[in-house]
Amino acid sequence: MQTRIRIQREDFDLNAEVSALAGNGEAGAVASFTGYVRKEGDLSTLTLEHYPHMTEAEIMRLATEAGTRWPLTGVTVIHRIGSLKPGDRIVLVAVASQHRQAAFQACEFLMDYLKTHAPFWKQETRGDKQHWVEHRHGDDDAVKRWEK
Amino acid sequence: MNLLYFAWVRQKIGKSEEQLTPPAKDVASLIAHLKNLGPNYTEAFADLSRIRIAVNQCHAGLDASLGPDDEVAFFPPVTGG
């Protein structure tokens, strides 16, 4: 399984990433999830901070776990950091497998665990005020369904 | 021991990183030690249900044991994705 993990300020190109995953013809299916900064009221900027090295290590652990649960040929995770605006792409999880069910399920699994385990923090700017986004308990419930 | 702080934990403590040699064998006793260092630490660690911990870049609990060369990070529950 080929695993690509990138934490970057720059935007990403969904088509290029999916093509790279499908590229060698091994995969019959690529499922991907793209997350965007939601437009919400007077939200002007979303600033993302992370824990360098642990972020990559944690996502690698999650990808490895996904690889033991489903027969995957490739995983790509890209997460942006820094200052983002409403409508900006923020995260990409793309999973390649021979069949669609494994690709769909592993993609959901990785997103659920990324939201609860990868060390990123979002700070919102509204007007001249900044505040840290609170963790959503619904995200913890989403992870529970994957527990063995 | 190398200590790292992120997000509002970093803001409350007023620094992102520091080197300490605390008399602590586990995370719980490290936090007890830090809370005595000043009101900024006391405030940051006032509610431990809002604090998450990593030891050597792996999620860990209050009972995780610590050695002198460990990297320990404190941060709020994560909000990526």
Image (cartoon, helix red, strand yellow):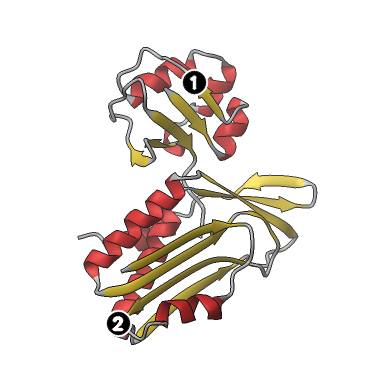
Whether residue A33 is visible to the viewer of this picture, yes or no, is yes
- Residue B60 found in image quarter: top left
Point 32% across, 83% down: residue: A26
Spot occupied by residue A70 in the image (x, y as percentages of width and height)? 25, 72
Are discs 1 and 2 less than 8 Å apart at CB? no
Q: Which residue is mark 2?
A: A101
**Element at badge 2?**
helix
- Local crowd size for mark 2, using a 10 Å CA cut-off: few (<14), some (14–19), many (≥20): few
**How many numbered marks have been drawn onto this rendered protein structure?**
2
Disc sitting over residue A71 in the figure: none
Q: Which residue is mark 1?
A: B19
Whether residue A145 is visible to the viewer of this picture, yes or no, is no
Spot occupied by residue B56 in the image (x, y as percentages of width and height)? 37, 35
**Which mark's residue is nearer the viewer, 1 or 2?**
1
As drawn, the residue found furthest toward the left would be A148
Spot occupied by residue A32 in the image (x, y as percentages of width and height)? 45, 76
In this picture, is A35 found above or below A84? below
Judging from the image, mark 2 belongs to the subunit labelled: A
The kind of residue tagged 2 is Gln
Residue sitting nearer the eye, A57 or B33: A57
In this picture, is A111 found above or below B5? below
As drawn, the residue found furthest toward the front would be A24
Point 27% across, 60% down: residue: A65
Residue sitting nearer the eye, A43 or B56: B56
In this picture, is A64 found above or below A35? above
Judging from the image, mark 1 belongs to the subunit labelled: B
The kind of residue tagged 1 is Gln
Spot occupied by residue A132 in the image (x, y as percentages of width and height)? 61, 46
Point 51% across, 55% down: residue: B80
Point 47% across, 27% down: residue: B3
- Local crowd size for mark 1, using a 10 Å CA cut-off: few (<14), some (14–19), many (≥20): few
